[in-house]
């Protein structure tokens, strides 16, 4: 890539005043570094990923309201986690976390276990039971 | 307590930490040099791992490998420590800062508060340098940031003990022993040979073979997985290529810069020509990202569009195969 072709597109980096470094060749053909504000294909890919996550959050929310899953799954999606990551944060096996998604099991969870989840999501146990504190 | 540490922004975190720590210790080693000598360039499809519910592809070697290989090849010694207990991890860090020793840390990205929200994912192989402590906050030189920043004690503990794949477990590292002069020339040759071996490996998911493998999968996705999933997968490939640590195109440019620098050090003009060739291959990777982003932006999954980007990847694989064969002969 030539120095003059280094993209300076709009991206999420801009509002935080962050620029990234790109390697490109100057007029003499020598490599140099130049700052970039972002590149559209990257921004589109990122937006795509975030949209996907939002869909998952909304889907989980709907299922909590329907009584099909516990708020744990909803908060997990809010924190961009998957079951594997959440399981390692609370120190449980994946199948145990999956069980905790069941509303019945969730309602019977000990205060200690609920606290573990609440800590991971940085909320209180009361807030954990109420999905209004997510997102 | 603040160590006199100069922050240089780099394109990639691990190269950056190594380059910055080397400069701090009086050795002027550029980011591309670290990347090249550490044989950072790779392509690997990891079939059984999913990241963000999509296939995982890596464009670089495992976290920590670049530093490890670099150190071994230029003849420096590094001390690496992992911890079970956050208190011990903090104590060891503080001890080093007291001794005026800036250290590299492996951290998780999700709780890095100075990153824009949308860039915070559960990715645990980020690297930064801690170079001091002020009013209870740690002074941070994160190589991908323009300027230095800070993290509170609690925030730093969170990122050092992030969980999930590549959990850092408080991983801390710093060089402890340097030779009088770095053995750069032989290190460059070892680094290049290693990368050629990786990229030409006779393994279906590694190197140029891996690129062809992914191209084949891309052709199948729209039919096998449906529009939505196919688009999500393709988006993820581009994200891993361009977003998460300057994968495809970006790494090729860094590698080209490395070859250019090496051609002068080794007095080998073939490497200068190959640097130009690698730059062109980098451009092809960017063309691929551009084309792929168009597909999922328009939310279409026309089979011919998917075939087109797959063909682009196959062209790249052919060119890289030729390239690495030439590179192997050039040294």
Image (cartoon, coloured by chain):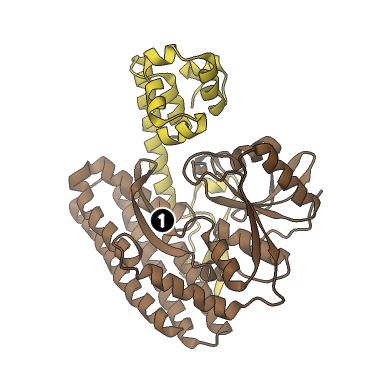
Give the percent coordinates (x, y) of residue B23. Answer: 69, 66
Identify the chain of the residue marked 1, using the numbered disc in the image.
Answer: B
Whether residue B129 sits left or right of residue A23 in the image: it is right
Judge whether B302 appears above or below B210 on screen. Answer: above
B166 or B322: nearer the eye?
Answer: B166
The residue sitting at 40% across, 48% down in the picture is: A44
Which residue carries the number 1 mark?
A: B58
Quadrant hosting residue A119 = top right
The residue sitting at 55% across, 50% down in the picture is: B126
Give the percent coordinates (x, y) of residue B206. Answer: 34, 62
Q: Which chain is brown?
A: B
Q: How many marks?
A: 1
Give the percent coordinates (x, y) of residue B93. Answer: 71, 47
Residue A85 in view of the camera: yes
Residue A27 in view of the camera: no
B103 or B72: nearer the eye?
Answer: B72
The residue sitting at 37% across, 28% down in the picture is: A95
The residue sitting at 49% across, 24% down in the picture is: A134
Quadrant hosting residue A51 = top left
Quadrant hosting residue B225 = top left
């Amino acid at each position: 890539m030539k120095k003059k072709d280094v993209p300076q597109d709009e991206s999420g980096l801009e509002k935080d005043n962050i620029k990234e470094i790109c390697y490109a060749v100057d007029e003499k053909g020598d490599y140099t570094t130049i700052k970039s504000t972002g590149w559209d294909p990257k921004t589109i890919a990122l937006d795509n990923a975030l949209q996907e996550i939002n869909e998952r959050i909304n889907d989980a929310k709907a299922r909590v309201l329907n009584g099909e899953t516990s708020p744990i799954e909803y908060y997990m999606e809010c924190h961009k986690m998957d079951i594997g990551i959440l399981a390692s944060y609370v120190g449980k096996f994946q199948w145990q976390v999956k069980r905790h998604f069941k509303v019945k099991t969730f309602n019977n969870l000990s205060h200690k276990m609920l606290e573990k989840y609440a800590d991971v999501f940085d909320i209180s146990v009361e807030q954990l039971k109420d999905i209004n504190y997510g997102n | 307590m603040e160590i006199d540490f100069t922050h240089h922004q780099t394109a990639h975190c691990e190269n950056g930490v190594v380059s910055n720590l080397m400069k701090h210790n009086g050795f002027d080693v550029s980011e591309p040099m670290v990347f090249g000598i550490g044989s950072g360039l790779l392509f690997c499809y990891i079939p059984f791992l999913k990241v963000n519910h999509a296939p995982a592809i890596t464009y670089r070697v495992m976290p920590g490998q670049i530093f490890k290989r670099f150190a071994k090849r230029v003849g420096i010694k590094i001390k690496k420590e992992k911890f079970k207990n956050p208190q011990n991890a903090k104590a060891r860090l503080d001890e080093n800062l007291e001794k005026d020793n800036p250290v590299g840390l492996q951290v998780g990205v999700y709780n890095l508060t100075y990153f824009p929200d949308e860039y915070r994912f559960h990715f645990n192989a980020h690297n930064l340098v801690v170079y001091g402590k002020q009013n209870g906050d740690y002074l941070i030189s994160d190589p991908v940031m323009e300027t230095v920043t800070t993290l509170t004690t609690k925030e730093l503990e969170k990122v050092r003990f992030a969980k999930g794949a590549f959990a850092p477990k408080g991983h801390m590292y710093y060089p402890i022993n340097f030779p009088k002069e770095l053995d750069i020339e032989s290190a460059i040759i070892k680094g290049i040979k290693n990368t050629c071996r990786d990229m030409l490996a006779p393994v279906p998911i590694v190197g140029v073979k891996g690129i062809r493998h992914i191209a084949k999968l891309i052709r199948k996705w729209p039919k096998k997985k449906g529009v939505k999933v196919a688009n999500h997968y393709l988006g993820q490939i581009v994200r891993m290529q361009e977003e998460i640590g300057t994968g495809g195109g970006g790494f090729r440019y860094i590698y080209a810069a490395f070859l250019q620098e090496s051609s002068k050090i080794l007095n080998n003009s073939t490497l200068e020509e190959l640097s130009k060739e690698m730059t062109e291959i980098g451009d092809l990777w960017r063309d691929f990202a551009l084309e792929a982003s168009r597909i999922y932006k328009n939310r279409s999954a026309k089979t011919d569009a998917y075939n087109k980007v797959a063909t682009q990847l196959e062209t790249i694989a052919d060119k890289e195969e030729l390239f690495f064969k030439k590179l192997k002969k050039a040294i």
